[in-house]
Image (spheres, rainbow, N blue to C red):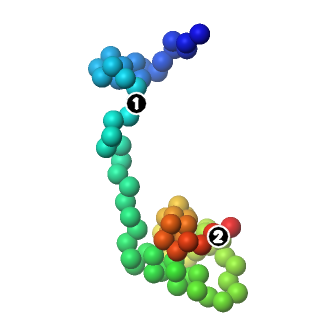
Amino acid sequence: MVNISLKYSENKKIGHFGRVKRLAGSGRPWSRPNAENIESVHSQEDRPHSHRSVRQIAREVHISRSSVHNITKKDLHIDLF
């Protein structure tokens, strides 16, 4: 049995486009961190015997926690706790 109850926005999309899937290019585009932010996070990680969390680094560098997490994972290839 198909669930017929749809949200108003989904119902509106079906009526206008004939589908519910997102269109390519719709939504907010991803932004890349700038080199200055990457370098500041990297300099925080270079300290010997520094077992600091993403939250601590974000507080010291003054950028968001999710940005620090993305920089360490995608740019520096480091897994922090």
Q: Nearer the viewer, residue 70 or 56?
A: 70
Give the percent coordinates (x, y) of residue 41.
51, 77
Which of labels 1 and 2 is toward the front? Answer: 1
Q: Quadrant of the N terminus?
A: top right
Could you tell me if residue 64 is visible in this image?
A: no
Label 1 residue SS: loop
Residue 4 lies, with reference to residue 32, above or below; the image says: above
Residue 44 lies, with reference to residue 7, above or below; the image says: below
Q: Residue at x 48, y 71 (%)?
A: 75
Residue 71 lies, with reference to residue 44, above or below; the image says: above
Under mark 1, the amino acid is Lys
Q: Quadrant of the C terminus?
A: bottom right
Residue 36 sits in quarter: bottom left
Q: Residue at x 55, y 14 (%)?
A: 3
Residue 16 sits in quarter: top left
Could you tell me if residue 5 is visible in this image?
A: yes
Q: Nearer the viewer, residue 75 or 41?
A: 75
Label 2 residue SS: loop
Q: Residue at x 33, y 19 (%)?
A: 18
Give the percent coordinates (x, y) of residue 71.
50, 69
* Residue most extreme to the bottom: 48
Under mark 2, the amino acid is Leu
The residue wearing badge 2 is 80
The residue wearing badge 1 is 21
Give the percent coordinates (x, y) of residue 27.
36, 43
Looking at marks 1 and 2 on the same chain, the residue that comes earlier in the sequence is marked by: 1
